[in-house]
Image (spheres, rainbow, N blue to C red):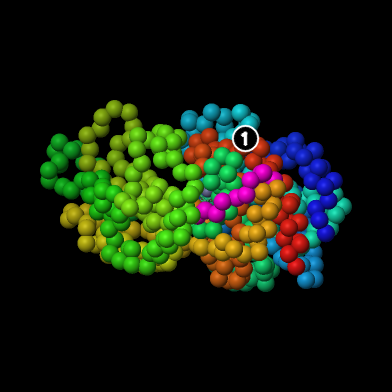
Amino acid sequence: MSAPNEFLNQLADSAPRHLEELMEWLRIPSVSSDSSRLIEVKQAATWVADKLQQAGLEVEILPTQGHPMVFAQSPEIEGAPVVLVYGHYDVQPVEPLDEWVSGPFEPTIRDGNIYARGATDDKGQVLTHVQSVCDWLASGNSLPLQIKFLIEGEEEVGSENLERMLPELSEKLACDCVVISDSGQYSDGQPAITYGLRGIATYELTVAGPSQDLHSGSFGGAVMNPAIALCQMLGTMVDGEGRVQLPGYYDKVQDLSDEERRQWSELPQDDPQFALAIGVESLFGEKGYTTDERRWARPTFDVNGLTSGHQGEGVKTIIPASATAKFSFRLVPDQDPCKVTASVEQHLKNHSPPGVRWTLKPDHGAPGMLASTDSRFVHAANRAIESAFGVLPVLIREGGSIPIVTRFQEVLGCDCLLLGWGLSDDNAHSPNEKFRVEDYHRGIRASAILWDEIGKLN
Ligand code: BES
Ligand code: ZN
């Protein structure tokens, strides 16, 4: 059965309602890392659960040790493919608040974009699939495949509860393919299918010195300054071109194939434009690799936050009692996050100065992911995206992480299809996050056509 044209036309007629509903969801401040937002996080789960239930899906809110997950499914159709749409309703913190032009939870439309935290990452993107399925059912047509949804509230904090529960959920989540829209297009007007993601390993390191802050005149020169110790320790992690100095760090790194490098070299990459867009004079990174190669397929080290001593107005001449850094590594296939942790501990033991104590707290870890570039689902997505965006998608990898994807591959034994509707200047995780309204609507259309194309596969 083919997606009736009438239904696709109706989708366009429903555009104002689709946008209104996204704005409603974006108004709920579901910051998963903020323990004062427990109620709002739950409200965001309930909002999408209600929407799916009203469309006639069988819906369950699955409690976890942390934030709840929303599971929904349409009836099984014998012999038809089963697709699981995975996404997240939780969002990143919003600070620095004063850099937002409009409030992060007051969605506002400017210049064809909808601005709000979660607009692109990931409420706006996952809602494209929710809308296409709800509208399909509302049109009175039956779906040509079985669709399941798993929309969780802890992706931005590492998906640890989902990972723990995945084996017991494997029957419920069983599918032929997981479809995820939590990535981006390659560039404006050039949609992409993402077949690789980097993994991640994150840490908090605290260096402690004197039992309280000291006058730097009276004590400077006599004690090790914890902030300096911390900077020195962090400085030993990378060399001047960003190569990570941990022992064995590159041992398992999968090299890029010549074919992959050739394909990526055909993408219209523009370094000066890229630098300009993010406000830097020049780009930086490992020699011998292009910018896309470094962002997508090379492992890195980054400091995500630094805290110590006086941060207020004016001068306060102290030796701070302690200093803390949050840092992370982006990993590539086949690096193991647990081995990275062991190696960070060993490295810090070898590189900590005398006179301070330190503690390392590993947070979350996930390996890098590679998916098929030639599956029947990729082919179906090519047709759907071409039809909705007017151009065939390019095949790319991305540098961000979706912690649970490799576990889906291993535990559910399914294919993974990553279709990103976002743009690289959508400001995910930054102030003024946005999603282009047109991409939201094209995403809904591509999604509807995708169900039709996948339904035709068997
Ligand atoms: N949507 C991103 C993942 C992503 C980013 C894919 C860029 C492709 C390009 C996701 O929501 C995310 O931000 N994940 C976190 C996971 C971390 C907090 C464990 C990330 O990558 O930092
Ligand atoms: Zn994110």
Please name the amino acid that badge 1 sits on: Ile
Q: Nearer the viewer, residue 44 or 436?
A: 436
Which residues, given as a range, are shown in magenta?
A: 388-397
Q: Position of residue 131 (x, y in %)?
A: 73, 48
- Is 384 magenta? The answer is no
Q: Nearer the viewer, residue 394 or 419?
A: 394
Quadrant in which the C terminus appears: bottom right
Q: Position of residue 248 (x, y in %)?
A: 30, 66
Badge 1 element: strand
Q: Nearer the viewer, residue 104 or 208?
A: 104
Q: Position of residue 374 (x, y in %)?
A: 59, 63
In this view, 77 is above or below 428: below
* Residue at 22%, 54% in the rendered image: 356
In the picture of the structure, the residue carrying the numbered disc 1 is 114
In this view, 331 is above or below 112: below
Q: Is residue 26 left or right of residue 288?
A: right
* Residue at 27%, 58% in the rendered image: 245
Q: Residue furthest right?
A: 140
| Res 11 → quadrant | top right
